[in-house]
Amino acid sequence: MWSWVFLFSAIVPDFERDVAPILTANCAACHAGVAKASGFSVEKLAFVLAGGKKHGKAVVGGHPEQSVLIQMVKGTLGPQMPMGKALASKDVETLEAWVKALPSDAPTAKTTWRWPYEKPVKPKGSSVDEFVLAKLREKGLSLAPEADRRTMARRAYFDLIGLPPTAEEMAAFVAEGDFPKLVEKLMADPRYGERWGRHWLDLARYGETSGLEGDGAIGNAWRYRDWVVDAFNKDLPYDQFIVQQLGGADEHSKSRNNYAPNVQGHVGLGFLRLAPWDRSNLVADEVRANYLAEVTAATSSVFLGLTVGCARCHDHKYDPIPQKDYYRWQAFFNTVQVENVTVPYADEEFAAKAAAKIKEIDARLKDGPEKAARDAYEKATLPRLVAKRRELAAGKTLTDLRLEMRRKEASQFSKAERRRYELVKEDADRTQDPEEQGALGRVDKELMGRLRLDPARFEVLDVEDLRKEMGNRQSKVFSEAERDKHGDLSEALDVWRRRLGRWQPVALTLKNVPGPPNGPAIAPVRVLLRGDYRLPGEAVEAGFPTAFTGKAEAAVMEIDRYRQFPTRGHRLTLAKWLASKDNPLTARVMANRIWQYHFGTGIVATPSDFGVNGERPTHPELLDWLAHEFMESGWSIKAMHRKVMLSAAYRQSGENAGWEKDSENKLLSRFPRRRLEGEEVRDSILYLSGRLNAERGGPSVFPPLPADLADFARYGRGGAAMWEPNEKDEDGRRRSIYTFQRRSMPLPMMAAFDAPVFSESCERRSATTTPLQALAMMNGNLMHEEAGYLAKRVAAESGDRAVQVKRAFGIVLGRVPSEAERARYVGFSGDLESICRVLLNSNEFLYVD
Amino acid sequence: MTRRDLLLQSYLGLGGIALAAQENPLAPKKAHWPARAKSCIFLFMEGGVSQMDLFENKPELVKRAGQRMPQAGNTEGEIATFSAAPNRIIPPVAPLRQWGQSGRWITELMPALGGVADELAFVHGVKVDNNNHGPAVYHTLTGNQFPGSASVGAWMTYGLGSANQDLPGFVVLGDRRGSTIGGTGVWGNGFLPAAYQGTLFRNGDTPIVDLNRRAGMSEKQQRAELDLLQWQNEQHRAGRTNTGELEARIAAYELAFRMQAKAPELVDLSGETAATKKLYGMDDPISEPFGRQCLLARRMVERGVRFVMTLHGAGGDRWDDHGDVKGRIPKHCKEVDQPVGGLIQDLRARGLLDDTLVVWASEMGRTPFDNNLVTDKPGRDHNQYGLAVWMAGGNVKAGATFGATDDFSVRAEGSPVPVRDVHATLLHLMGLEQDRLTYLHAGRYKKLTDIGGRVIREILA
């Protein structure tokens, strides 16, 4: 009763399970193999979709009534098939249900929401305020009065550099009040890139480990992180910012034959590698399909603000994005090959520092204390392995033969025999081929017959054997304590090995496959039915979404005039289309993101979804105006900061008497208060205590984990360490953007403050309130240590309790205490550290007005 | 009544200022339908439990022990690769036998579970989307094989809030031998707000990270600090409008302070009788750790914790028995049998089983044949088509079975049961409907079951 089920439920017929049996039984006699009547074969899904010579396409996805296959089995198109008989009606229904569920050429979603696909016309206007005020006036509202200088300074510092002003900076600004000057100063501060780069890393789903089995490092992701920070600091025009992340190292030369792209272009490409990575999967097709799917979802939502990723398995339910468009987008990435590339450090100073570091660590690995300690332990334990193996030896086994072979000159076997044996065994091990293994078996058998057991054979056991035994959980030679000790000694050495790897100038990136004539042909991208890599359908060519172009045509690729590199330029083609002034969405999407990071909510409140499911823009004209201003400024993000931050809308107070008419603040009748983000909380606490390590860039660091988690930070006893010590204590106190982003082990305090591990692109952080935040802030390591240091700092700089309280307020809150506060704090029973902790926990500190 | 108390009350949803109550993401919410279960204990066995050694009686495996595995039909992906190799069939490590009125087949290695067999409902032939641990764990626990989605517990807490505001709504009881393979993400909030993430309870004196006051800090001292803080926050709030979130934070500090008293009481087992501890296998060092976790789980649901994720297996001690099934499987069974059997018995005796949904799952099943590794102690490989899941309590139909695997326990007999069907069923049993429990993220109304699962009505009472 399958067919009945299909008609009345969401269960979709499966080609292999439901459709193929019908076709095989009824049609294959003529439509298969060499016969292939009318050029049509039902042998495989791909053949059925490809259609025949006579009628062309056999099925039209989503439209059984237009499909030749259905018309012919029903007899509405003659001759009725199968020739001379009629298909059972339940089988016809199954075929119909199957065709109905196939992807169609036209989008399923019927929507009148065309705004995202229409190129914005620049509205008349000269400032942000003009647009904001127009909307407010409609409701009889106006902007709130300008915020006081202290509020303005705190707002601008946190907004642009993610840290509060020092007491001195605050005093200077309160005295002078030159806000445009302050904005310029902060944008020129290198900490600006650390703050705004972090926003981009959220979008780029920045993490440094695979997130899955073993959660090992995916490569030197930090190169990409530093590239992003630097791009923001030097105000890299946003169109180039896009091109370098998607089309890096993909350009041709107009004048040079055999041109090699700029190797530095590989660093920004890290964007395409940052997602979780299923490295242990043995099925290459599945890994590839998942990789392409992820890249498609990420690139379309981040750069275009459209959720193309929703069309993997079927047409987009809401937006005019057919499933085919999804695979046509994917096809731009079909030439990529996941592989890291050596990219020399562009900055000479850093290159010198890294070279010195590599030299130092190399030396340490060769003869440092960790090496010496493990060597000594191995030297001491190896004789026991030899003795115990000899003691446990019983009978004649293959192991004995292998040992005998390793005895070189002392072996009973001749050099030629040993050589031959080595080759046969190597082939069998490498290929795992039954034939090769059979050959090894025969040789083994013959030699075993001749093998004489010599007790001296155990002398060839070496450290490799020892390490293997030390890793054997069922070891009969070494105790658990001994194995743990060896594990710890090895781990101490491995830490240096991993550090060495992080300093090596290898970027997390990808390459293009060579393609013909330099390599094998590349399989085309196919529409995958239900997104399943095992159900490939028709092949598609790379092309832009039809919602923009009107029809599904192949994109004109950036090709090399010498036609030497056919796989180069595909990514670049997509990148340039995105980074074009003609693209109706790109500038709007980024202008909206910038607005969101300033005001907490975007003009479109769903910044990665401008589609039907997204929120409608509150100020569409303003957004279009900003998008034009953005492009006209040469895609300068800093120009946008000026435009936004110098407006009265940004400079207004958080309190407006008429707020109830705009209770959700959609019209911006006041400046929205916001809670600090996790990074801002941690960085500011360290900064105020005077202990923030301001070093910039380079391999990531490991802030200390809470002691409670230490044993949890490994995969089981003796498993790989998930967290590492730092080389220097102060490395643990660098800004949060420089901390190692292990997907399986976020810092608990950061996780509590809504800074999750980024496995998917995150377009907007939540700001929740939980008791776990309070616990971290009352009892956590960081708070306790840094409140103590802050207290020391205050005590060193000032005199009696009243002066101390004044100073602590100045440092933490940037103001003097009120008379009531002064009295209450001076009379407080706790010590200065307590006072510092209270101030660092206060809402006034944790929120920005 | 002080202002602090008033705020606290409003935070707890007992009345008072409505705005502050809205700010509490864990306020209890109405279920979509009046299901019996109010709490869920999810027993997760990491590594891939061997369904044919524990729960599936397959005479063919005994009959053909040591013979080469016949080519299994209709296999794909890794399983196809595996079964193409010359693999030998491994019979069950110990006999299975029928237990209780229902005649349920369970291994003789699990007599305590056998003793409560009539309480259980099984689903066989559950299919996971990936044959490797990392993605499979994510798929079973979050509905998506890649990290970033919300876990089952996060969804349930999001849907129902929490009945106890002094404790987290979603607790994770970890295996003290190490972390799960996907790390904290497998019980994470994913795209849901952070309030719905699982809170890890440690097996020790500090059950929650940062719960304990620092050495040298007395309760009185901390109270004084907190009073000053709340006074300070009150000053700050007084001059402002739209202060819901500020008030919520004031309340959150009070809750944290209370949690410091409540959570240690929760994990303090000194009030439990020796008989109870024995019931949970805590008298035997092998079953003591998981027995403690199960007993804690009961204490949690007694106190209204919504979801308790109870993890077993870590590192080399997972159910990932690639080698030495004969040595390892009896040990895993011994570690969990008495604790799990005792838990069901205890919940029943205390009248809690009707209000509690107990779930047993792993991330995959295993193969009937050896994985062709060169060893004298054969082991079983991964099998993404053979996961067996059981449930008990709430509206679960005790003694029911749904789905089956073929004669070799390689693949489902008939249609496989996708994991999303299990998820749909779990939500349903907690009073939630998959299509109403959604969250708009990245352009889609996300749900735990993604494209939608089928509630397995065959195992509902």
Image (spheres, coloured by chain):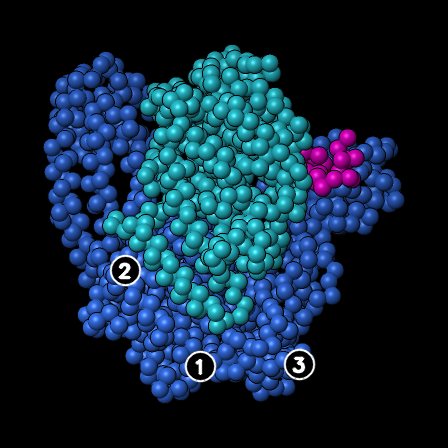
Chain colours: A blue, B cyan
Residue A458, x across and y down, in percent: 16, 24
Name which of mark 2 and mark 3 comes first in the sequence: 3
The three-letter code of the residue at mark 3 reads: Gly
- Is residue B454 located in the magenta-colored stretch of the structure? no
Q: Vertically, is B269 above or below A197?
A: above
Q: Which residue is identified by label 1?
A: A148
Corner quadrant of residue B287: top left
The three-letter code of the residue at mark 2 reads: Gly
Marks 1 & 3 on one chain: yes
Q: Which residue is identified by label 2?
A: A830
Q: Vertically, is A244 above or below A13?
A: below
- SS at mark 1? loop
Instruction: Tell me if B151 is positioned left or right of A816 in this view.
Output: right
| Disc 1 to disc 2, C-alpha distance | 32 Å
Circles 2 and 3 in contact, beta carbons < 8 Å: no
Instruction: Tell me if B250 is positioned left or right of B289 in this view.
Output: right
Name which of mark 1 and mark 3 comes first in the sequence: 3
Q: Nearer the viewer, residue B120 or A560?
A: B120
Chain of the residue under the numbered disc 3 shown in the image: A
- For the record, the magenta segment spans A1-20
Q: Which residue is identified by label 3?
A: A140
Quadrant occupied by the N terminus of chain A: top right
Instruction: Tell me if A18 is positioned left or right of B113 in this view.
Output: right
On the question of residue A63 being in view, the answer is yes
